[in-house]
């Protein structure tokens, strides 16, 4: 995709989100500290980052980018049900949220998919980080019901995807190293 087209797509998505925000606020005024607003903002952030991906690919912070030994062994992720989460994603329409993280042309596609996996992982990581201050605010306010709902949303929308993407990135890197391709994920 040409960079101008990619930026135009990003700006169109951002403008649509902004217009929807203004229109909804006129029809049903809400507080910016509302849990619903923050939840929608969390999902919109993922949409904006995805729309920007052809031009700007987020990356994990350096120290978190490397996949640790305990992650490679997989015991923790298996105990947490991450493989089952991955099967759920692959076997349902949920896989359509980001088709770019799947190989299309065998290992010839591996470098592109590896970059997409890391960008998707970083998107969910930064999305989780953006919501943490609001969760702290809820805890300080004693709004435990909203805090628990946000904790569940964080786990389902951000934490499990990050864990699954890390496992997938490791598996792809391991497969590529067997085939003598360097993807840049070794740590």
Image: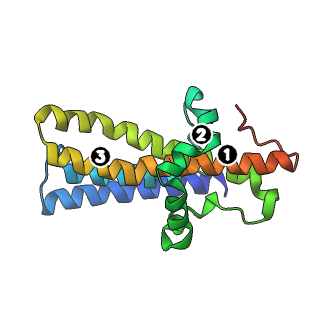
Q: Secondary structure at mark 3?
A: helix
Instruction: Count residues near mark 3 (Cα–Cα under 10 Å), then give few for <14, some for 14-19, many for 20+.
Output: some
Residue under label 2: 71
State how far apart marks 2 and 3 are (Cα).
23 Å
Residue 49 visible: no
Q: In the shown orientation, is residue 93 left or right of residue 15?
A: right
> Which callout, 2 or 3, points to the residue nearer the camera?
2
Viewer-closest of 166 and 1: 166
Q: Position of residue 118 (x, y in %)?
A: 61, 44
In front of the other: 105 or 78? 78
> How many circles with numbers are drawn on the protein?
3
Instruction: Please give the residue where the numbered disc 3 appears in the rendered image.
Output: 151
Marks 3 and 1 in Cβ contact (< 8 Å): no
Q: Is residue 165 above or below residue 186?
A: below
The answer to whether any part of residue 85 appears in the image is: yes
- Dot 2 lies on which element? helix
Give the residue displayed 69% in from the left and 54% down from the top. Answer: 113
Q: Which of the 4 image quadrants contains residue 180?
A: top right
Residue at position x 12%, y 55% in the image: 29
Q: Is mark 2 in CB contact (under 8 Å) with mark 1?
A: yes
Horizontal and vertical percent for residue 140?
Answer: 15, 31
Q: Residues within 10 Å of mark 1 (few under 14, many from 20)?
A: many
| Along the viewing direction, whichever of 174 and 35 lies nearer the viewer | 174
């Amino acid at each position: 995709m040409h960079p101008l087209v990619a930026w135009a797509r990003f700006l169109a998505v951002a403008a649509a989100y902004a217009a929807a925000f203004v229109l909804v606020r006129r029809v049903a005024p809400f507080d910016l500290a509302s849990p619903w607003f923050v939840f929608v903002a969390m999902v919109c952030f993922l949409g904006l980052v995805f729309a920007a991906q052809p031009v700007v690919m987020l990356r994990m912070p350096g120290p978190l980018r490397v996949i640790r030994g305990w992650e490679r062994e997989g015991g923790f992720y298996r105990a947490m049900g991450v493989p089952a989460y991955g099967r759920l994603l692959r076997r349902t329409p949920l896989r359509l949220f980001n088709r770019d993280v799947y190989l299309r042309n065998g290992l010839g596609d591996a470098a592109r998919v590896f970059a997409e996996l890391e960008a998707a992982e970083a998107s969910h990581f930064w999305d989780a980080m953006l919501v943490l201050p609001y969760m702290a605010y809820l805890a300080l306010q004693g709004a435990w019901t909203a805090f628990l709902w946000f904790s569940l949303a964080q786990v389902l929308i951000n934490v499990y995807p990050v864990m699954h993407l890390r496992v997938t990135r490791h598996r792809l890197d391991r497969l590529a190293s067997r085939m003598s391709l360097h993807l840049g994920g070794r740590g």
